[in-house]
Image (cartoon, grey):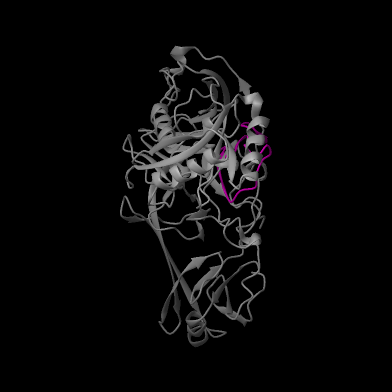
Amino acid sequence: MSRRTLAAGLSLAAALTVTTVPVAAADQASVKFPSAKFPLGTSGAPTRKLTSVAQGVDLYDVQAGSSSNSYTVSVLMPSGRDYGMRQTAESVLAQVEAAGETATLLEVVRPAVADAPSQTVYMVRVGDWKLEEKKKAEEMVSKLKDAGLKSRVDYTGDDGLETTGPWNVKVMMIDARTFRGSYASSLGTSVAARDKVSAMAKSAHALAAVNGGFFNIHTVKNLQGEPVGASVVAGKLLSEAVPGRSAVVLKGRTARITEISTTVTAIAQDGSKSPVNGVNRAAGTDELVMYTEEFGAKTPADDGADVVIDATGKVVGVRAPGAEVARGTRVLHGTGVATEWLSAHATEGTTLKIDTKVVDLRKRSAIKLTPDVNVIAGSVGLVRNGKTRITAKLNGHDSINMILRRHPRTLLGTTRNGSLIVAVIDGRQPGITVGANFIEAARFMRWLGAREAVNLDGGGSTTMVVGDKVVNRPSDGVERGVGDALLIMPK
């Protein structure tokens, strides 16, 4: 089994064509690029170039706005953040002035979102320099350091406050009426390893692809490809859900944004049951974690135990932990009390049933894990029933940095008739493109016609691939390896 795909691949021999489409023809589609004023900044209608990727799949290269922001220096608070409460910020301001520099106290209001109230904080800023004068800002950082003050160079276009742009955006619109392909997900070479979107797209012979959800950068290095949230590939659960987190459920050529739950239970031959706490991730204390052949790494080499089961559920081995997962098998790894359960109920030659349930929490119904079902974990919900509904706190992203500051974004939305909209907004490139904050991202997706929309992973992960080519400008300067990808497949 090729772990490069983790999704059914079909052969593809399609060329991209750039076309000029009459307005009347474009208006006939069930999903279309809006003609109204660009929703970010103060610019009018954006410039756009249309590329026909395949029947029912259109790619728009969108540019809007112009550069008007500058560089400044943000002085850090004792907490290490660039903002704090007023009293703290005033104290830092006084230290800057005592060092002989002129500083400004900036009040910043982080807007309220659906599940978190607004927040007012204060920043201390020094200087204002044009784009070509960044070196002067860097020199100020050095001067402040000599005075015992920590600071950093900041581009004001990243603040999330007023800006005129510019914005470089790629928007892919997939018409539910005319698209004859399908959607899939891929975890690349393995669950544990990160892989490039372009590599996943090429291996699966996809028409196009974008990066998927967040992956776990807070675990050991060789496991950092693990999705943070639910992952289903070709009907197989490869990562458990994070309670309440948005997800994209793909089935054939349909896509649905919802919240899901996952429950995995090990049922021994003697009827005893134990919850499986995780799938294809590091094991915590007193946990039972299941590893599949797609894991791509060894089970934890700890004081626990491994039980190997074959495709029928028969226990074919009880072993010390820290070994590979053989093809055609799964491994239940226990720590603490979970090890004791395995020892008592999963002896060699007995059987273990693994009961897996995936539930759509909006529909309150089970999702049957057939081979055409794929799930990608989203992050922050942006739009629900056509209205802005940003669920940042629920998804652990209710900070100033995540809600207000601008970053590159990968966004996914569905329209009233089930068409799919995928957009990447490039950012972190002063004078070229500023990205978007959550409020702007929701506004942008509503402008495009999304009735439901979710924020996928962003920052340096934001990548869109068409054919074998990366068509946006990743902010790292090169394409980053990510945890998973959404694939747009041909027939």
Q: Looking at the picture, how far across and down is residue 151, in whole percent?
A: 58, 43
Picture quadrant where residue 462 is located: top right
Q: Which range of residues does the magenta coloring cover?
A: 462-491
Counting from the top left corner in percent of width and height, residue 403 is at 43, 41
- On whether residue 27 falls in the magenta region, the answer is no
Foreground pick, 341 / 358:
341
The extreme bottom residue here reads: 344
Picture coordinates of residue 72 (x, y %)? Answer: 56, 32
In the image, residue 247 above or below residue 35: below
- Residue 252 seen in this snapshot: no
* Vertical arrangement, residue 151 with respect to residue 1, above or below: above
Q: On the image, which quarter does residue 268 sit in?
A: bottom left
The spot of residue 291 in percent (x, y) is: 57, 67
Queried whether the magenta region covers residue 471, the answer comes back as yes
Q: Quadrant of the N terminus?
A: bottom right
Whether residue 376 is visible to the viewer of this picture, yes or no, is yes
Q: Is residue 121 left or right of residue 436?
A: left
**Figure label count:** 0
Query: On screen, 18 above or below 414?
Result: above
Towards the viewer: 254 or 208:
208
Quarter of the image that includes the C terminus: top right
Q: Main secondary structure of the magenta part?
A: loop
Of the pair 464 and 312, the residue shown nearer to us: 464
Residue nearest the observer in this picture, 15 or 481: 481
